[in-house]
Image: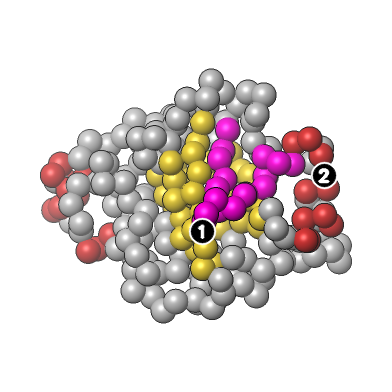
Amino acid sequence: MADNQSPELFGQTPWQTVGPFFHYALPWWGGADLTGQSDIGAAPTRLVGHNPALNHSHGRPMPAGEPIDIFGRVLDGAGEFVSDALIEIWQADADGQYGGAFPGFGRAPTDEAGVFHFRTIRPGSVPGPGKTLQAPHIAIGVLGRGLLKRLVTRLYFADAPQNDSDPILDLVPAERRPSLIAQRDGEAWRFDIVLSGPNETVFFDC
């Protein structure tokens, strides 16, 4: 493990309220591509060089389902970009199953403009409380400067008919539900995360 002392490889450890964190595994090359087809997920400005040991995702077989790209910005209460946040997602596969060959988990830092980007598979519906069925969704965690604990929210898809009967969305006041709905933007889905203020994203206790 001699390379763990190499500033040329790892750079300076970033300052974080919830950190500092060790770049060897957080984030990693390919960590934002749950389909296993690319290296997206590491921030080149924070992780110098391309150490093959960090590339855990690229090269897996393409999972079944509809591949989608998700991107968005993390904004603070003043509408300023948050350039040092870390976004995590976890989800079911296209059949609404957790585990198995599909990893269901990804991680991506925001860039200098506060933008994050994931490539994944559109999830299927999963069981909800009682005998209900939840709308297809992706759980999202946000870590970053000024946050003493992870913030947790959900991403739903604007064109999913199941949104109208989702038991979790039903708990959210109607005027605040748009903050949980991703919208089509060209070939991708856009989902901005607002940490505070009048347009704050709905976050859940968990």
Element class at badge 1: loop
Which residue is drawn at the image coordinates 24% and 63% (left, top)? 53
Residue 80 pos. (x, y %): 47, 25
Taking 112 as reference, is 1 above or below it?
A: below
Taking 147 as reference, is 29 above or below it?
A: below
Query: Magenta segment: does it hold 186?
Result: yes
How busy is the neighbourhood of tag 2: few (under 14 within 10 Å), some, or many (20 plus)?
few
Query: Is residue 181 found left or right of 6 in the rendered image?
Result: right
Element class at badge 2: helix
Q: Label 2, label 1: how many angstroms apart (C-alpha)?
A: 30 Å
Residue nearer the viewer, 200 or 71? 71
Which residue is drawn at the image coordinates 57% and 31% (left, top)? 195
Label 1 belongs to which residue? 187
Q: How is the image coloured?
A: secondary structure
How busy is the neighbourhood of tag 1: few (under 14 within 10 Å), some, or many (20 plus)?
few
Q: Quadrant of residue 5?
A: top left
Residue nearer the viewer, 88 or 39? 39
**Quadrant into which the C terminus falls:** top right
Residue 27 pos. (x, y %): 36, 50
Q: Could you tell me how many numbered marks the image carries?
A: 2
Residue 170 pos. (x, y %): 83, 48
Q: Quadrant of residue 10?
A: top left
**Residue 68 seen from this side:** yes
What range is drawn magenta here? 177-194
Query: Is residue 204 found left or right of 22 in the rendered image?
Result: right
Name the amino acid type tagged 1: Glu
User: Of the residues tagged 2 and 1, which is closer to the observer?
Assistant: 1
Residue 124 pos. (x, y %): 67, 68
Label 2 belongs to which residue? 171
Name the amino acid type tagged 2: Leu
